[in-house]
Image (spheres, helix red, strand yellow):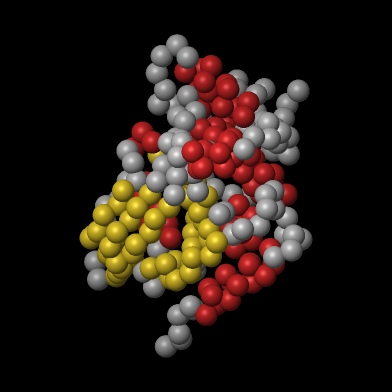
Amino acid sequence: MWLTEFDTPVLPRESVHEDARRAGDPRGLALKLRGVAKSFGARHVLKDLDLAIAPGEFVALVGRSGCGKSTLLRLIAGLDTPTAGLVEAGTADERRLMFQDARLLPWKRVVDNVALGLAGPEASARAMEALGQVGLAGRGGDWPSTLSGGQRQRVALARALVHRPRLLLLDEPLGALDALTRLEMHRLIEQLWRRHGFTALLVTHDVAEAVALADRVLLVDRGGIALDAAVSLPRPRSRAAPGFAELEDRVLRHIVGHAPTAA
């Protein structure tokens, strides 16, 4: 039977993530940024930024367009280098980045897209296992052109997971999806994070999405971290849950309060 983007697999309800953090399990990667600055010519995007993220933590970066949150993610991903300061984010093999565009190769079948970068006789089996984890076990032989937007993003997620990353970087991967598909992807990403215990860093314009998924919501503004809000709401989270709307409103008020003044 073909699965749709709404067929989210129900993974075993494990406390792997919480247990891993208590025991110091190395599955999640610790991040540390000290005095980080990034300039493009005369434009200073990040200035003397300090940030620490614990192993297995889920952190969301929010802020206005152009505030530097994607620049910060690219520095952590190793796709760019800071103008000044130090970024400690493990090795390239320990990190995987998921973009808003799934970036699938149209001439390769789904399973081969997931297996990109893998070598050896187990590559296809590992790719099929990853597809099963994202609810696409029956779609490995299909072409990317036959998939919906939500399914394509599931394939991109499987392609990241197949490498068993310690750090998963998410650069607005759900921004182009419809509301219902986004909710299903929220549930899936949270389940996989809890199961595998990796550290997750999400860039999003959607404050509700940040509150729904993250342990901490960081507001990036004027080159630094303007707000570091802990999210202590129980999981899985609903927008109707007590405290959700209040925290969302608090972050939004900070974003509005840090709006650039008109000339």
Please state which of residues 3 and 147 is positioned toward the viewer in this rendering: 3
112 is higher (above) or lower (below) than 155 = above
252 relative position to 45: left or right: right
* Location of residue 195 with respect to 208 vertically, above or below: above
| Left or right placement of residue 158 versus residue 262 in this view | right
In the image, farthest residue toward the bottom: 263
Q: Position of residue 225 (x, y in %)?
A: 42, 67
Q: Quadrant of the N terminus?
A: top right
Position of 189 with respect to 84 (left or right) is right
Vertically, is 76 above or below 145? below
**In this orientation, does residue 257 appear?**
yes
Residue 195 lies in quadrant: top right
- Indicate the quadrant containing the C terminus: top left, top right, bottom left or bottom right: bottom left
Of all residues shown, which one is farthest toward the front?
23
Residue furthest top in the image: 121
Front position in the image: 27 or 129: 27
Number of numbered markers: 0
Query: Is residue 121 shown left or right of residue 140?
Result: left
Rendered residue at 62%/38% (across/down): 15
Q: What is the x, y in percent for residue 231?
A: 59, 59
Front residue of this view, candidates 27 and 59: 27
Kindly identify the residue that appears in the image at 59 percent across and 27 percent down. 131
Q: Residue at x 42, y 22 (%)?
A: 118
Q: Decide if residue 96 is in sight here.
A: no
Q: Is residue 26 above or below residue 233?
A: above
Tell me residue 3's x, y (percent).
72, 30
- Image point 48% across, 78% down: which residue? 258
Give coordinates of residue 238: x percent, y percent. 73, 55
